[in-house]
Image (cartoon, coloured by chain):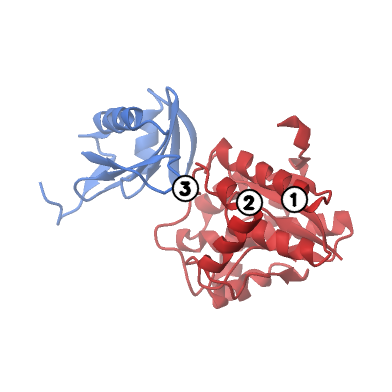
Chain colours: A blue, B red
Amino acid sequence: MYSVLKPCKTSAAFEAIPRERFSLDLDQCEDILKNVCTIVTNAGILLIVNDQCEVSIHKDGRLILKTDSQELADKQAGRIAGWLEGTPAIRKHRDSRG
Amino acid sequence: MKLVSLISGGIDSPVATYLMIQRGVEIVALHMDNRPFTDDKNLNKAMDLVRHLRDLTRSPIKTYIVPHGPNHIAFARNCQRHLHCLFCRRMMYRIAARVVEKEGADGILTGESLGQVASQTLQNIMVENQATKVPIIRPLISFDKVEIIDIARKIGTYEISTLPGLCCTIVPKKPSTAARAADILCEEQKIDIDALIEKSLEGMYVFSPEAM
């Protein structure tokens, strides 16, 4: 679902980019994720905390994973994808491949 | 002359502050704390920059920190996303204006330079200026990034500014580059701006360099 890339030169976080185009309903994401994570805020972006890594979830599906460990970022992106995949929180775009 | 300098953890604001100190201006620093949309490293960088400038110029720099995260949340929940950076800056100026009043200062100092990021267009700056009657001094307005980095390297702030620190994550994907004042005022009516300012000031505290 995601490929993980470094977002900025300061290397304070990783950005996970969706492999295919979709949008997220953040309210539905909150409902799903509140059972497995701590929700920090839902305000245009959804901020969650899980284990040692805080994650910003954007409506366009991007994730900002606040960690300098690529291993942890990969793991967290995979877990979030697993929690959200197949739920109504994900709306795939018509022109999306795959 | 005394100015309230908006200090972020970035490259530009410490350079602007340094240049004005060299002109004999007394500085009161104000850091708007964007957590949870940034991280602790950003706050630490800003405070390291203040400490460095204080030691470099041998000037006392009183430093305030104001929580800005709740303001972001209010605007993100209620107003148009593409205008977010303008709401953010207008709030910073309003809060800085209150610090100007509190400190008996003469104006606000920022590190903005024209066209450097999407929100720093002349049209946006004009709309942002209308948030306050306090003069806003922008010594870097005509500088390009290379010129600013050159100065930052010379004064030793570049190495601190480029340490790891999360960029603001609530910045919209496509920020407005040509906002209209009427649109901004219309959107801001959805928010109790005065209450947000008061709440921000209630959370304001003075940074003690010895505490970190």
Determine the chain carrying the residue at label 1: B
Sequence-wise, the earlier of marks 1 and 3 is 1
Structural distance between the alpha carbons of marks 2 and 1? 9 Å
Task: Sort mark 1 into few (<14), some (14-19) or many (20+) by Cα contacts within 10 Å.
Answer: few
Nearest the viewer among B183 and B69 is: B69
Counting from the top left corner in percent of width and height, residue B149 is at 55, 61
- Dot 1 corresponds to which residue? B56
For badge 3, the amino acid type reads Thr
Q: Is residue B88 above or below residue B48?
A: below
Q: Is residue B20 left or right of residue A20?
A: right
Q: Secondary structure at mark 2?
A: loop
Structural distance between the alpha carbons of marks 1 and 3? 32 Å
Q: Which label sits on residue A83?
A: none
- Dot 3 corresponds to which residue? B169
Are marks 1 and 3 in one subunit?
A: yes
Q: Are marks 3 and 2 in contact (CB under 8 Å)?
A: no
Sequence-wise, the earlier of marks 2 and 1 is 1
Q: Are marks 1 and 3 in contact (CB under 8 Å)?
A: no
For the point 62% across and 76% down, the residue is B126
Q: Secondary structure at mark 3?
A: loop
Q: Is residue B147 above or below residue A84?
A: below
For badge 1, the amino acid type reads Leu
The quarter holding residue B132 reads: bottom right
Q: Is residue A84 visible?
A: yes
Nearest the viewer among A46 and B13 is: B13
- Dot 2 corresponds to which residue? B156
Q: Secondary structure at mark 1?
A: helix
Counting from the top left corner in percent of width and height, residue A10 is at 46, 45
Number of numbered discs present?
A: 3
Residue lying at the far left in this picture: please name it: A98
For badge 2, the amino acid type reads Gly
Query: In which quadrant is the N terminus of chain B drawn?
Result: bottom right
